[in-house]
Image (tube, rainbow, N blue to C red):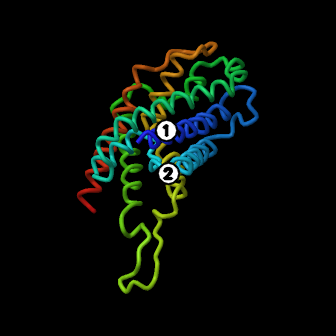
């Protein structure tokens, strides 16, 4: 199990290094990628997940997300005893990944005066303030979609199997590995990310938010703790509903 936890840590660290990195690259002052836009951010996060899955997939299953681990456990595809270790590894990976982003772009953080911009490279905040219940709904729906589709990738029709005559091998979408999840993350970001920034992952949001609070970032604002529960509770509820949906349908 230690090996699985280690790969969850490394995979999540790389996920946040690349995902937080694209946020920093497209928003911080004097970055060559500044202003590249939402499509680049959504694609960057998709590719970040892809790399994390390639790293950890063959060892730990590459959950890289406490909500995914919870959903798998509730759906019966993961042992409950492994969940705490997975979550701890993911959270530590998220914290280290966010710290690496700050170290990498340190000069650009120093050159950026706006505290909101700096915070946005670590964690999510809503596009419109003051609607936490609606923001919670958005995170629930987006995470439900993420976890439900990931679970569906594992059903028989999406796996390698022989036809009824046992003569022809069929390879389903789920056997393409990281590629379907990459497109799924991009689709969620492009379609459902505009309201809350689509955290859909407590290790992507809470762990980097803690890093923002702790690191000596020049000119930073508060870490948005009044909103911080939304991108944690939303993904947890969304994952639970996704597992329920999966069990009822499949």
Q: Position of residue 167 (x, y in %)?
A: 43, 85
Q: Residues within 10 Å of mark 1 (few under 14, many from 20)?
A: some
Q: Quadrant of the N terminus?
A: top left
State the residue at coordinates (53%, 42%): 11
Which mark is drawn over residue 215? none
Image vertical order of residue 31 relative to residue 106, above or below: below
Between the C-alphas of marks 2 and 1, the distance is 12 Å
Give x and y (percent) for residue 131: 38, 29
Q: Residue furthest left?
A: 248
The mark closer to the camera, 2 or 1, is: 1
- Give me the disc on residue 57: 2
The local secondary structure at tag 1 comes to helix
Q: Residue at x 56, y 51 (%)?
A: 54
User: Mark 2 packing: few (<14 Cα in 10 Å), some, or many (20+)?
Assistant: many
Picture residue at 68% right of the left edge, 20% below the top: 112
Count of number-bearing discs: 2
Q: Relative to residue 61, is residue 33 drawn left or right?
A: right
Which element is circle 2 on?
helix
Q: Which quarter of the rendered picture does the C terminus lie within? A: bottom left
Q: Is residue 196 above or below residue 117?
A: below
Between discs 2 and 1, the one toward the N terminus: 1
Q: Name the residue nearer the viewer: 52 or 124.
A: 52
The residue labelled by disc 1 is 6
| Percent position of residue 79, x then y | 30, 47
Observer-nearest of 109 and 178: 178
Residue 89 in percent (x, y) is at: 45, 34
**16 above or below 73?**
above
Q: Image point 56% across, 22% down: which residue?
A: 116
Front residue of 134 and 54: 54
Q: Quadrant of residue 236?
A: top left
Closer to the camera in the image, 48 or 127: 48
């Amino acid at each position: 199990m230690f090996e699985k936890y280690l790969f969850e840590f490394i995979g999540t660290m790389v996920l946040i290094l690349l995902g937080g990195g694209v946020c920093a690259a497209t928003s911080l002052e004097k970055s060559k990628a500044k202003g590249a836009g939402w499509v680049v951010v959504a694609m960057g996060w998709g590719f970040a997940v892809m790399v994390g899955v390639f790293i950890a997939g063959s060892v730990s299953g590459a959950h890289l997300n406490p909500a995914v681990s919870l959903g798998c456990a509730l759906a019966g595809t993961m042992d409950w005893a492994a969940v705490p270790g997975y979550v701890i590894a993911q959270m530590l990976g998220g914290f280290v990944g966010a710290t690496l982003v700050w170290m990498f772009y340190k000069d650009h953080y120093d050159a950026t005066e706006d505290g909101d911009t700096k915070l946005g490279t670590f964690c999510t905040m809503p596009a419109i303030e003051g609607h936490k219940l609606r923001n919670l709904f958005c995170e629930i729906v987006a995470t439900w979609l993420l976890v439900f589709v990931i679970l569906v990738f594992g059903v028989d029709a999406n796996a390698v199997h022989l036809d009824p005559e046992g003569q022809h091998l069929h390879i389903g979408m789920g056997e393409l590995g990281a590629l379907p999840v990459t497109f799924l993350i991009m689709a969620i970001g492009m379609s459902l990310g505009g309201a809350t920034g689509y955290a859909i992952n407590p290790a992507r949001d809470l762990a980097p938010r803690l890093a923002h609070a702790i690191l000596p970032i020049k000119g930073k604002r508060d870490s948005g703790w009044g909103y911080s529960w939304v991108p944690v509770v939303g993904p947890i509820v969304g994952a639970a509903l996704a597992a329920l949906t999966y069990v009822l349908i499949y």
